[in-house]
Image: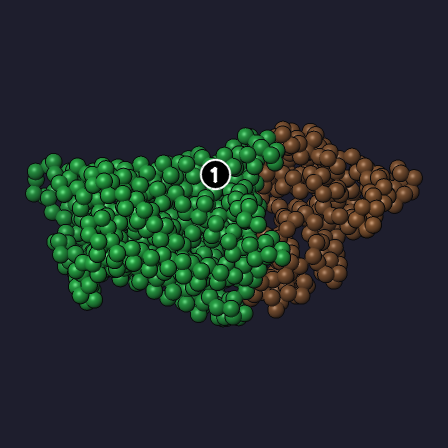
Chain colours: A green, B brown
Amino acid sequence: MKVRILELSRRLVIEERFIAIKNLPRFIRRTGGSATEGKRYIDRQIFFGYNVSVAAMIAFSALLTVTQVRLPYHLAHIQTLSLVLYSYIFLISLYSFLMHANVVISYKLMEPLKLLPTDMENSVLPLSWFIFTGSPSLFVIIPPLTAYIWYTGNIYSVFYGITWAFIMLVLGYSAGSAMVFALNGKNKEKRHLKNGVIANIVRVSLFILVFALFEVAMQIPQEIPILPVIASFPLYMAVPLLGIPYIVFSLGESLSFMYFGIAITLLYVLVATFSFRFINKRTIRKIIRIEMEQAQSFSPSRKNGKTGYSFYGSLIWKDLKTMVRNPQNLLMVLIPAFLVLPTLISLFFFSPDLSFNSVSIYYSMITIVVLASAFYSITLLMSEGDGIRILQTLPVRNIDLMYSKGFVGILLFTFIVVPVSVIFFLKIHGNPVIFLLFPVNLVIAYSYSTLFSLRRLLKKIPKGADTVNFYTFGGSYELIALFILSSVLAGIPAIASSIVQLRIPFETFSSQASFYLMTFAMNAMALFLALKLSRKGLGF
Amino acid sequence: MDRPSILVENLFKNYGQTRALDGVDLKINPGEMFGLLGPNGSGKTTLLKILCSVLDYTSGNVEVSGLNVLRDSMQIRKIIGYVPETPVLYESLTASEYLDFIGGIRRIDHESIEKKKDRFARAFEIEDKMDTFVGSLSFGTKQKVAIISSLLHDPPLIIMDEAMNGLDPRSARILKDLLSEYASRGRTIIFSTHILEVAESLCSRLAIIYRGNIVDSGTPGDLKSRSGGRKLEDIFLEATNSNDLNMVVNSLKETILQ
């Protein structure tokens, strides 16, 4: 039975990849249409992808560790770094499960299991996620652990370090499951569309709020009333996340720490196990129900709203509707906000050295540009799913898709950026030029990096494709490639403006307003070039 | 003589090492109602997808109304109404919103869309389903929406891949009458089907495709007279090498029903 569950987990992952790449010319060329070769190719891809992910995690973490061990008080720095890495495991786990669930739900991959007299589906989904997608992030903790043991010889850290990595991974999975569960509504047959959409937005906002509180707790523990009370050892160890470095790296220091650390670790193992058992079965049941009754939970509240859009209007409205009405798509769209906004909010409210420097805020907002540009480009195309077959029979060119989806992305991005800009400037009391150019620059930077991302992705969809999903574009590699591309594109104007300010000693260039004006000029140029260049080589 | 609606010359299509079309030649004239028959996996859908410019081919030449399917893809998509073998629609749009979307892409004016939507919905008895999400519709209703969407822009060339699948008898009859009317008005119609009676009663010409090649073609009358007046079913089974039917059924009886 266990072997069969393992095989089914593997099958689920193969299926995910296969439906995405079966029409790709590269896949057809390399496999020659043979099923055996196809299976081998996908197996190789999965194996290779896993190893690259593991290597990337270790390399990324090793780089950070090396920079920390060169600093004075390096042991304390390694502890701080581990805090970041454990939260990273949690977030990557959450995000990767959302992606996995999105593909499984969209393509009804669990449905065949439902027809069989077995309840294996409860194990197949988490196992397939853990073995092939989730587990590489565990390796991120190895470099700081190795460094710590190298300096201290404290071998207890190995055991606790790994145990805590697993705990964070499982908690991330459970949080992702809870989101899938909550966002897919109740078992009501009929619900008004408007209420459904509002409910989805409220739920996602609540998640963001919870994460904001979590981030605030991490950044400024003394702002949370309860924390000072327990901020002394060893109770500090019990604080979620914040306590981890003390448990993992301090257990050898005294016997009382050790006992307390063991107790806390056991407690969290129980919490992780309980949360997994509590949510997993319910989420799987919901996923199968969604697969079987997709879209049945909504019914439009009024007959025939506005109809008769223009060509681009039709494409844009279709995208907006399919994004907002589908909880999976909505979740994907809100991921950038979800990952970055809590940090910004906590920085804004609690960081004492914000110094009202809007340029540094602009730089941190570029992170949102990069995340949103990469996520939205992929999500907006992924949301087509099988719909790509409809588009390929209609007189719609790739360039039309690039513009319409780019526009939808800009709308969504503006929805995030404008309120953030208003809040920041209420606090910063910036001058009107900055107030205006801050969001405008961000939106322009987003626009041209998205045009390039969409162009890159559209070229990867072959003619005659049956569907589009995360793996059509190459999965995580492509996401990383888009992050790099967007970082470079969106970052260059800002960095160039800063360099000009540093190098040219005229007072005219030194103000924050002149930074925004220079960045605006360069951004506008970049957008112009993007509009010109992105048309080329897109095919019909 | 008008130029043909469809001209296919020595068409090959490979999926890796698998050959889906093996030198197909075909000419269909304007106003013809052309039926494509063939067993599963014989290459019907591949051929229809190539005609719609959804799929590229390996070699040969394909022209639709004088336009090359590789070079003039967008123009061809404008003049074709295509119904795929399984209805693929946007599940989170309502039927009405989906048809509005197609109308918008086809640049049809708002008033015409509304008028056509109403008429088709009434004809196919789906007025009460127009404001329901496509994801909640039955297979047959989805098929009706897909058919309506392919006819909204009044295309000169209609390509239907097993469009009768899932339709109730009334809707199937309406579709048949509608297609006959379109053909009488000079529209070209190509459709694949497994229902031989439909092909026989409706089509002006038929072709049987087997293993990527057209093995027989002609008017239903021609096909019958060439085979000595046999039924279309027998002609089809013989052309597609299915003479071993009795042996297969007997073998199944012995192994499964023992």
Residue B192 spot, x, y in % from top left: 72, 46
Residue A486 visible in the picture? no
Give the camera-side residue of A67 and B132.
A67
Q: Looking at the image, which residue is at 35% across and 37% down?
A: A56
Q: Residue at 69% x, 52% y: name it.
A: B163
Give the image location of residue A476, x and y in percent: 41, 42
The residue identified by callout 1 is A46
Residue at 39%, 43% (x, y): give it.
A136
Disc 1 crowd, CA 10 A, few/some/many (<14, 14-19, 20+): some
Across the whole image, how many numbered discs are drawn on residues? 1
Residue found at x 79% / y 38%: B240
Q: Is residue A141 left or right of residue A72?
A: right
SS of the residue under disc 1: helix
**Residue A181 is drawn in which quadrant?**
bottom left
Horizontal and vertical percent for residue B10? 69, 29
Image quadrant where residue A509 sits: top left
* A311 shown above or below A39: below
- Left or right placement of residue B184 versus residue A428 in this view: right
User: Which residue is most to the right?
Assistant: B228
| A362 relative position to A54: left or right | left
Residue A64 lies in what quarter of the image? top left
**Percent from the top left, x then y, of residue B44?**
69, 41
Residue A360 in view (yes/no) = yes
Of the residues shown, which amino acid type is indicated by label 1? Ile
